Amino acid sequence: MKSTLSRLDRLEQLTGILRSGDYHVAGDLAVQLGISRRTLMRDLDVLKGRGYPIETDQGRGGGVRLNRHWGIGRLNLNYREVIDLLLSLAIMEKIESPIFLGNLKAVRNKLSLSFPPESRNRILSLRKRLLIGNLASAQVMETSPSPNIPSASVIYEAFLEMRCLELSYFDAGEKKTRRMVEPHYLMLNWPVWYLLAWDHLRHDVRCFRLDRISHAKNNGTVFKPRSKKIFTEGIEEITSAL
């Protein structure tokens, strides 16, 4: 058992060394690992048998290494991780960053193609529910918006699943109210996030600053998308006050 474990550890160490992308002289590798050159060759054969693309260079100063592009395309992401990444890319695209945009469209397309067509439509609708406005006004910044959003994960989950939220909210006058809302849109006026929702208490569209939500609970009630018109009509009035 001890020899088996030590060999597994050695193979892991050897893989780590080769991942640097540099060529390593076989004799130096053997010394570094404390093994004979013959044992090193056997270990390299084991790695090749496991699918590691090991390259060799017989020239002066040459040696062995892993293909420098090995690992690209081998990243496994779960459904939620891909959704988070796609929405993050959407934000980058919407703010029209002067850098980092060169390959975003290609990356987005490749990620989207990893889903079946019906899921792609859902992702597209999620992207449309992300709104990017202007920078936060000086008036908003004077109120020292907190970067901490206590219920961020709960709000985000309800936004993705289109489920109603029960909120404890402090307005600009520090007055606390309890609301039940449908989280239809997330809006960013950098660096401040807002929730654009249908408020069951007011029976109207309302905008909530996320850092002023002291508590949020997903009550499990699924809501249907309301007419976009009732939100777009109020967006200009809402954003002019931000």
Image: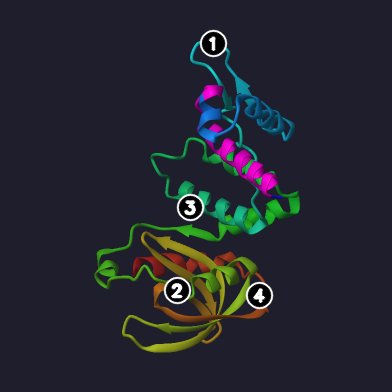
Q: Residue furthest top?
A: 59
- Residue ID at (61%, 32%): 70
The image shows residue 205 at horizontal and vertical percentages of 50, 75
What range of the chain is rendered magenta? Answer: 2-27
According to the image, label 1 marks what residue?
A: 59
Amino acid of disc 4: Phe
The image shows residue 174 at horizontal and vertical percentages of 33, 85
Amino acid of disc 3: Ile
Q: Is residue 23 visible?
A: no
The image shows residue 89 at horizontal and vertical percentages of 52, 49
Amino acid of disc 2: Cys
Task: Determine the secondary structure under disc 3.
Answer: helix
How far apart are the alpha carbons under marks 3 and 4?
24 Å
Q: Quadrant of the C terminus?
A: bottom left
User: As rendered, which of 130 and 38 lies closer to the eye?
Assistant: 38
The image shows residue 49 at horizontal and vertical percentages of 74, 31
- Closest to the camera, between mark 3 and mark 1, is 1
Task: Determine the secondary structure under disc 4.
Answer: loop
- Comes first in the chain, label 4 or label 1: 1
- Up/down of 219 relative to 137, above or below: below
According to the image, label 4 marks what residue?
A: 223
How far apart are the alpha carbons under marks 4 and 1?
67 Å
Give me the disc on residue 207: 2
- Closest to the camera, between mark 4 and mark 1, is 1
How far apart are the alpha carbons under marks 2 and 3?
19 Å
According to the image, label 3 marks what residue?
A: 91
